[in-house]
Amino acid sequence: MNQDRKLTFGKYKGQEVKHIILTHIGYIMWCFENLSWFKLTEEEQASYDAVAIMIKKEGLQMTFPVETMYKHVKNREALDKLKTPFFLNGGHTACRAEDKGTPICKSVKKYASRSVTHSYTNTANIATGILHSMNKEIDSACLDWDSDEDIFGGLDDIISY
């Protein structure tokens, strides 16, 4: 089993990239926009695409420019058709039951298990809390008037990435 890649810089240094995609997709978008060398693996990109498409499909209001996020979606056909295994279910992001065996849903299942409570034991809810976590991080940064460096981490650690 491959170990998931971890960020080596910034606010989320040491955390797995897929977890950041699920909990703070705005940070990944910032990396795309500001770090010319920043790339996602194929599996990470699939997760990024699925979360971004869910945000568009559900019409979620974000505190960052969603059009910028969409421009980094590689699966343009899925974006055009709004095809994603994720959906909003009672304020939580879930994976449709028919998609629970797909690579995207399987790849995020371990992150959901970190935050799943006893009331979310249904296997269809494998990505519980993504929306809440994303908005919590972004709202906190905006309310604290943090600078980009405070939010996204210093650029001095980037060279080791």
Image (spheres, rainbow, N blue to C red):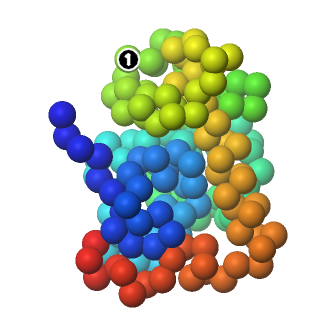
Q: Residue at x 67, y 58 (%)?
A: 137
Kind of residue sitting beneath label 1: Gly
Displayed quadrant of residue 75: top left
Q: Residue at x 69, y 61 (%)?
A: 138
> In this picture, is 25 found above or below 132?
below
Residue 87 percent coordinates (x, y) = 63, 28
Asked if residue 84 can be seen in this view, the reply is no
The residue at the far right in this view is: 143
User: Dot 1: within a 10 Å radius of its alpha carbon, few (fewer than 14), some, or many (20 or more) residues?
Assistant: few
Element type at marker 1?
A: loop
Q: Residue at x 49, y 53 (%)?
A: 20
Quadrant in the picture for the N terminus: top left
Residue 29 percent coordinates (x, y) = 52, 63
Circle count? 1
Quadrant in the picture for the C terminus: bottom left
Q: Which residue is mark 1?
A: 101
Displayed quadrant of residue 9: bottom left
The residue at the far left in this view is: 1
Residue 67 percent coordinates (x, y) = 63, 60
Left or right: 68 as drawn, with respect to 65: left
Asked if residue 141 can be seen in this view, the reply is yes
Q: Residue at x 38, y 17 (%)?
A: 101
Left or right: 57 as drawn, with respect to 72: right
